[in-house]
Image: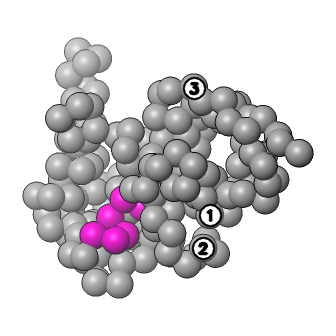
Amino acid sequence: MSLSITLTINGVERMLALDDPRVTLLDLLRERLELTGTKKGCDRGQCGACTVILDGRRTNSCLALAISLDGADVRTIEGVANGPDLHAVQAAFIAHDGFQCGFCTPGQIMSAIGLIEEGQAGDDAERVREGMSGNLCRCGAYAGITEAILEAQAHMANAERKLVA
């Protein structure tokens, strides 16, 4: 039996047939849609490597059953840059060496974008560290990650102020 759902993924509406109601959003993204930037780390919602933005909120895609997401809007790491122009968070991660091996980086970036968009980043490093505590980095690049998020948040806030003015 095949079940159909519709998802908007990185701004593109996709009609998908699911042969198994137990497939997670993570597996759907990686295996069916070949969006492999979202990583499978622990597969238990503990590491954050699979973080995506689901209907405007940070979500561990390994814990979300695809069948329950009919009509949802999903943004993955593949959907944050604007053509050749990196997202402010991506650029800040590069500028502050917010990665080493790079495995956790997509999830870190998606979580950081969500943190900023949710208005939870502020300008306090401790607040950022707390907000990012669901994303683990085995290499220990936390200082660079925190600095990158603070810079990106300030950059995005300045850009928004210029648009309003």
Residue 112 location in percent, x, y?
38, 55
Q: Is residue 113 magenta?
A: no
What residue is disc 2 on?
43
Amino acid type assigned to the residue bearing label 3 in the image: Glu
Q: Are marks 3 and 1 in contact (CB under 8 Å)?
A: no
Q: Is residue 103 magenta?
A: yes
Residue 142 location in percent, x, y?
28, 75
Q: Secondary structure at mark 2?
A: loop
Which residue ends up furthest to the right in the rendered image?
A: 1
Amino acid type assigned to the residue bearing label 1 in the image: Cys
Q: Is residue 48 visible to us here?
A: no
Q: Is residue 47 left or right of residue 23?
A: left
Q: Is residue 7 above or below residue 138?
A: above
> Which residue shows up at 15% across the image and 58% down it?
94
Amino acid type assigned to the residue bearing label 2 in the image: Asp
* Precedes in sequence: disc 3 or disc 1: 3
Query: Where are the magenta residues, as a range?
Result: 102-107
Give the alpha-carbon distance from disc 3 to disc 1, as whole Å. 21 Å
Residue in front for this viewpoint, 87 or 69: 69
Give the alpha-carbon distance from disc 3 to disc 2, as whole Å. 26 Å
Q: Is residue 111 left or right of residue 62?
A: left
> Which residue shows up at 25% across the image and 18% down it?
163
